[in-house]
Amino acid sequence: MSNKEPIQHVCIVIPTYNEQGCIKETLLNILAQCPHITAKLSILVFDSHSTDNTPTIVQSLQSQYPQIYLSSEPQKTGLGSAYIQAMGIAMDTLHPDAVIEFDADGSHQPHHLPKMIEKLEQGADVVIGSRYVKGGSIPADWPWHRKCLSVMGNLLARVILTPQYKDITSGFRATRTTHLKKIQLSSLLSYQYAYKIHLVWELHRLNLDIQEIPTDFIDRTTDLSKFPQNNVIDSLRVIFTLRLRTLERFIKVCCVGISGIAIQFTA
């Protein structure tokens, strides 16, 4: 048995922007997993100034499902920014023991939630929904360039940062809030998709028990993909900046050590 704090309350944060075609189904599918989850479950939808009926649909469900909460920002600031704000609001107002990052468009599958939470209850600090461990998958019908970007981008992040995790670019993740509070979320390098790389790197640097479970990533079936064109450049910037920061610290330590040896030798 783990001697860590028990997981009694989990909050799923879901950023939205013009998700009227799928948000109701996503929320109902998550709630359908409640009988398989022992912890109290809350859902915080964070809307980035949708121009469609997304907020209205969420509000229509709140009277029947009081565990659904809605917050919003006055203008769209990016996926990473939305997740960062949503996690902060969840921790400040709902006080959960863990937060799960969950996309609204159906790409993250609710049936994986009980297993993720079970891993936390067994003592894990972070649980990553991994597409690249045995049993995980990416869409078979993805165009070759999407598969290449996903596989090669993840491989590059693992080579440059750490090979310890199979899916370092996953955005489906459960984290104990005691550890999230140790990270200055507002200082993450990206407000777009690459925020997830920086966040898992900061969690890794805390020497936490980070585990992966296999998950199936499903491409959105409603509307067009919201994959930003500059995502690759932004991800490369984050990956290399994080590595350069580490090398800079290493070089400083070496210089201090060499200077100390030189002074002692001279003396």
Image: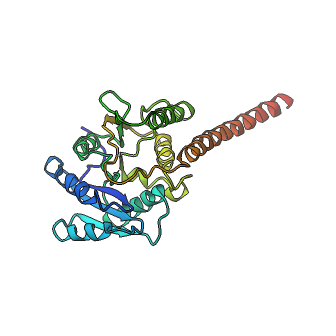
Residue at figure coordinates x 82%, y 28% from the top left? 265
Which residue extends farthest right? 266
**Quarter of the view holding residue 146:** top left
Residue at figure coordinates x 56%, y 49% from the top left? 230
Display coloring: rainbow
Residue 258, x across and y down, in percent? 76, 32
Residue 79, x across and y down, in percent? 45, 56
| In front of the other: 131 or 255 | 131
Q: Quadrant of the N terminus?
A: top left
**Quarter of the view holding residue 181:** bottom left
- Total count of labels: 0
| In front of the other: 30 or 139 | 139
Residue 243, x across and y down, in percent? 61, 39
| In front of the other: 36 or 152 | 152
Residue 176, x across and y down, in percent? 35, 49
Q: Is residue 6 above or below residue 250?
A: below
